[in-house]
Amino acid sequence: KDVSQMLVQAIEHFKANDSKKSEEVLDDIHRSFELNKETLAAIYYLKSIIHNNSPYISIQYAEKAVKLGKNQIRNHVQYIAALISYKKYAEALKASKSALKIFKDDVRLYLYTSICLIREGKYKDAKKHIDIANSIRESALSYFIMGELNLAVGNAAKADEYFRKAES
């Protein structure tokens, strides 16, 4: 088997909810082949997803994926999501801003940035990032985050309006 076939196999195991087998295949690839940066980044990316329930481990793998594969948006998104899930908002904000320099039109990055800004009490900046995300593409997630923003500033009625909009 070659690396690409084994990566597909690892993904199939993951899709079948067999994370252990998926990680075994990824470890086997890592041990058995001379890997380029992109392939190694893909392995770290997949390992980060496998460990989503263990944010600290997920962050470590996602950070390696970003360092090796800066040109892949998926690596940045996974890293930032892992940081947010571990409540490392300042680091996630820094990573989001860095990724936005490369991927200026990615809605997820603007929304992740807004989540971090809300958690840091920077509500006006958060609103700006939500508005930018909506100018690219409106989504239920942006409405939900707008609801969170309105809750944070004490506007429960407006928050409820956005939460309802997110549900529809």
Image: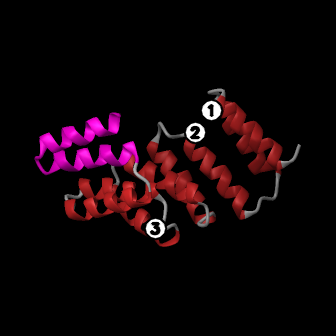
Closer to the chain start, of discs 3 and 1, is 1
Q: In screen coordinates, is 22 left or right of 59? A: right
- Disc 1 is placed on an element classified as helix
Closer to the chain start, of discs 1 and 2, is 1
**Which three-letter amino acid code belongs to the residue tagged 2?**
Ile
Q: CA distance from mark 2 to mark 3?
A: 25 Å
Q: How is the image coloured?
A: secondary structure
Residue 64 at least partly seen: no
Q: In the displayed structure, would residue 73 be above or below residue 11?
A: below
**Residue 14 percent coordinates (x, y):** 65, 33
Q: Quadrant of the C terminus?
A: top left
Residue 47 at least partly seen: yes
- Disc 3 is placed on an element classified as helix
Q: Residue at x 81, y 58 (%)?
A: 34
Q: Residue at x 47, y 72 (%)?
A: 101
Tell us which disc is closer to us: 3 or 1.
3
Does the magenta segment cover residue 157? yes
Q: Which residue in the protein does label 3 denote?
A: 100
Q: Which residue in the protein does label 2 denote?
A: 50
Does the magenta segment cover residue 116? no
**Which three-letter amino acid code belongs to the residue tagged 1?**
Ser
**Contact, CB < 8 Å: mark 1 with mark 2?**
yes
**Residue 21 percent coordinates (x, y):** 69, 31
The magenta-colored residue range is 139-168
Mark 2 burial class by Cα count in 10 Å: few <14, some 14-19, many 20+: many
